[in-house]
Amino acid sequence: MELRGKVGVVTGVSKGIGLELVKQLLDQGAVVAGWGRNAPGLNHENLHFFRCDVGSEQEIQSAVKQTLDMLGNEITFLVNNAGYGVYGNIEEQNWNDWKGMFEVNVIGLFEVTRNLLGALKATGESHIVNISSIAGLNGIKGFSGYVATKHAVRGLSHSWFQELRDYGIKVTAVYPGSVNTNFFDDIEVMTANENMMRPQDVALSIVQLLQTHRNYLPVDLEIRPLKPKG
């Protein structure tokens, strides 16, 4: 897909992979609706920021309306990037920890996609990229809640691929390993370090996914750092 002039939505654009992805999409000439809880501090004529916590149904519906009112009713790509994790063994986590992760990582992802589906169908050629995690393929000690949400993203992606392919809509799940981002800021047992992948490299992989031929679909993309995370 040629990205120049194409309109797309990226969630979770405040920092990390989302911010780096927006920068690279703009470099390719795309028009980006960036959704997030905080503005990314990036000014560009083709970037339109809409404040949205994807854990809130009301905020999602508001962001959808604002996006379509401003940019039109055709969306060519959607990158569901927003998400977070809470560390803790089973007896250390609680109802609210799990509820919060599922509301953002799973239900929010579903609601964003559902509300934009008409605009994605309207183009006849579009791509949904769901950012899962290596945690969507494996179990990880201390991250059972996060792991559960990311396995759910994998299941949604595989199901939507089958549901939407006849509309010309691709669906890809991306499974990054450890990335040097603020994800680890609140996790005492693990800190971001230089052995982790750079967010701009993960973002580049997503851009390359979006640029593939309309009849070529990587259903799953697993990305890992070469070095142990340390």
Image: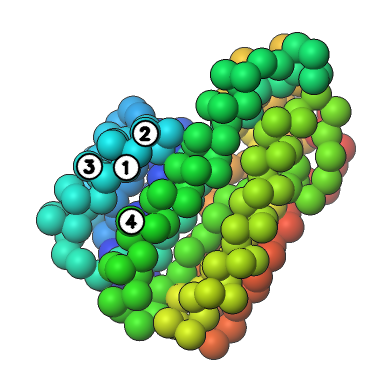
Q: In front here: 213 or 111?
A: 111
Residue 184: image quadrant is top right
Q: Which residue is mark 2?
A: 56
Residue 34 visible from this viewpoint: yes
| Residue depicted at x 53% and y 26% | 100
**Drawn side of residue 93 relative to residue 48, left or right:** right
The mark found on residue 60 in the picture is 1
Q: Amino acid at mark 1?
A: Ile
Q: Which residue is mark 3?
A: 62
| Residue depicted at x 60% and y 58% | 156
Q: Earlier in the sequence, mark 2 or mark 3?
A: 2
Q: Earlier in the sequence, mark 1 or mark 4?
A: 1
**Mark 1 and mark 3: span between their CA atoms?**
5 Å
Q: Residue 131 location, x and y as percent?
A: 58, 50
Seen as rendered, the residue at the extreme left is 69
**Mark 1 and mark 2: span between their CA atoms?**
6 Å
**Drawn side of residue 179 relative to residue 73, left or right:** right
Residue count near mark 2 (Cα–Cα under 10 Å), binned few <14, some 14–19, many ≥20: some
Q: Secondary structure at mark 3?
A: helix
**Drawn side of residue 206 relative to residue 41, left or right:** right
Residue count near mark 1 (Cα–Cα under 10 Å), binned few <14, some 14–19, many ≥20: many
Q: Amino acid at mark 2?
A: Ser
| Residue depicted at x 30% and y 31% | 39
The mark found on residue 112 in the picture is none
Q: Secondary structure at mark 2?
A: loop
- The answer to whether marks 1 and 4 mark residues whose Cβ atoms lie closer than 8 Å is yes
Quadrant into which the N terminus falls? bottom left
Above or below: residue 128 compared with residue 136: below
- The answer to whether marks 1 and 2 mark residues whose Cβ atoms lie closer than 8 Å is yes
**Mark 1 and mark 4: span between their CA atoms?**
8 Å
- The answer to whether marks 2 and 4 mark residues whose Cβ atoms lie closer than 8 Å is no
Q: Amino acid at mark 4?
A: Asn
